[in-house]
Amino acid sequence: MTDSQLIQEIKQGNVELYSKLMRRYQRKILAFVYHMLKSSGMEVMAEDLCSETFYKAFRSLSSFREVDASFSTWLYTIARNTVLSELRKQRSGTLSLEESGVVPIAPNEGAPEQAILRSERVHMVREAIKKLPEKQRSALILREYDQLDYQEIADILGQSVSSVKSLLFRARGSVKIQLEPYFYEPDFEELKGMKSR
């Protein structure tokens, strides 16, 4: 059954079919929510916010109109708004590290230096993404992590396709500028040279 057929059936009272829609999109929405939260170090909340997204979508399904957007676009929009709402709540009542449930992960003592460097790079990229304005960050996550096309991103963000391309261009440029000092430090280049000897 297509999304449209399932939604029609659910609207007519076959609510048990909603679980099929959930299974169809759960991994994608969870990954999207996880990546949006990761930049703020709140990824432990991803499953809860994913569940909240599906709950909100179910409650509002009667008002969903395919003329306005596809079901997946509508669902991503709900997920994005749910995450942004939670991030605003967290910022207004700043939590300590212990209260947030976020546990910093230290590298293993015996971890090879390449794994440590890779971990540092991932951390630097996350920090760079975290500093982006919200729309640039969302566009970058939807494009790079969720592999959505420009039109889908435009629908989710309520922007034109050309605006999305502009957001992505600025986001990538900003991330590159932030990371250049880290990746081109003489110490890093020397380390690479030492590895090839």
Image (cartoon, rainbow, N blue to C red):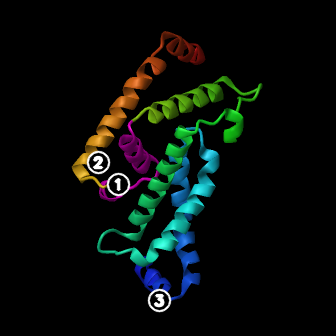
Amino acid found under the numbered disc labelled 2: Val
Residue at left offset 29%, top offset 48%: 164
Is the residue under label 3 in contact with that under label 1 (CB below 8 Å)? no
Asked whether 18 or 100 is in front, the reply is 100
Categorize mark 2 by other alpha carbons within 10 Å: few (<14), some (14-19), many (20+).
many
- Kindly state the secondary structure of the residue where label 1 is placed: helix
- x, y percentage for residue 26? 56, 64
Q: Which dot marks residue 12? A: 3
Counting residues from the N terminus, which is met first, the one under dot 1 or under dot 2? 1
Q: Residue at x 75, y 29 (%)?
A: 108
Look at 25% across and 52% down and name the residue there.
161
Q: Which residue position is annotated with label 1?
A: 153
Whether residue 177 appears in magenta in the rendering, the answer is no
Foreground of the two, 96 or 16: 96
Report the Cα–Cα distance between label 1 and label 3: 30 Å
Query: In the rendered image, which quarter is residue 43 located in?
Result: top right
Residues at discs 1 and 2 in contact (Cβ within 8 Å)? yes
Q: In this figure, which residue is indicated by the disc labeled 2? A: 164
Circle 3: element type: loop
Q: Nearer the viewer, residue 131 or 143?
A: 131
Between tags 3 and 2, which lies in front? Answer: 3
The answer to whether one can see residue 1 in this image is: no
Q: Which residues are magenta?
A: 133-156
Magenta-highlighted stretch: main secondary structure?
A: helix
Label 3 vs 2, first from the N-terminus: 3
Q: Residue at x 71, y 29 (%)?
A: 106
Q: Is residue 138 toward the left or the right of residue 107 in the image?
A: left
Q: Marks 1 and 2, Cα distance to the nearest angstrom?
A: 7 Å
